[in-house]
Amino acid sequence: MTATPDLGTAQLASPDLLRSTFRRHAAGVAVITARGASGPVGFTATSLTSVSADPPLVSFGIGTGASSWPAVAEADHVGVHILGEHQSELAATFARSGADRFGAPTVWREGPEGVPVLDDVLAWLVCRIVGRVPAGDHRIVLAEVVLGDPSGAGRPLLYHQGRFSGLRD
């Protein structure tokens, strides 16, 4: 049975309303990486979307105030990493402001096009950026898949109600 919304308690649109609503939306967890002028950069994203199969395109959002934004704004290529449920600490590291994201225990290597590629993920892609679309205080980055490896083992990491978790059977 579907609950009928109580329109008498509706909230006006605000950033808090959006955040509260999307805390209820379970999302897959990815880490986006790029080569920056002073080293690798990366951040945790729950906004990753498959856009098109032909050509193969993905998109993700990034705040223009994020520490990774200057590198992503200039990069030709990015890495997209789908995290497994065993990687909640990695997701937290890449989400934490000021963290040494590429220091131990993070294991990574320089991949194609100089993109940092994380080890032990469910899947990774190297993508060529084809557009950056202004969207409020964010940019929607549109990227074409160049190559990747979808053969990692495990189950996906999810983000729901402000925390990382795995699927339940």
Image: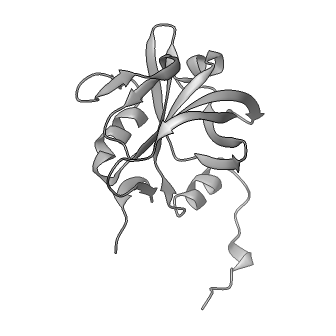
Q: Which residue is drawn at 35% across and 22% down?
A: 109
The colouring scheme, among rainbow, by chain, secondary structure or one colour, is one colour
Can you tell which quarter of the image residue 134 is in? top right
Q: In this view, does 90 lie to the left or right of 75?
A: left
* Image position, residue 69 (x, y; %): 58, 23
Q: Is residue 31 above or below residue 42?
A: below
Q: Is residue 115 left or right of residue 106?
A: right
The quarter of the picture where the C terminus appears is: bottom left
* Image position, residue 95 (x, y; %): 42, 36
Q: Which residue is drawn at 59% across and 61% down?
A: 21
Residue 50 visible (yes or no):
yes
- 104 vs 112, nearest the viewer: 112
Q: In this view, does 17 lie above or below 124?
A: below
- 8 vs 107, nearest the viewer: 107
Q: Which residue is drawn at 39% across and 47% down?
A: 151
Q: How many labels does the image show?
A: 0
The quarter of the picture where the N terminus appears is: bottom right
* Image position, residue 12 (x, y; %): 73, 59
Residue most toward the bottom?
1
Q: In this view, does 100 lie to the left or right of 2?
A: left
Can you tell which quarter of the image residue 138 is in? top right
* Image position, residue 87 (x, y; %): 31, 45
Residue most toward the top?
38
Q: Residue at x 52, y 47 (%)?
A: 46
Q: Is residue 7 above or below residue 162?
A: below
Q: In this view, does 136 lie to the left or right of 59?
A: right
- 118 vs 163, nearest the viewer: 118
Q: In this view, does 26 lie above or below 150?
A: below
Residue 81 visible (yes or no):
no
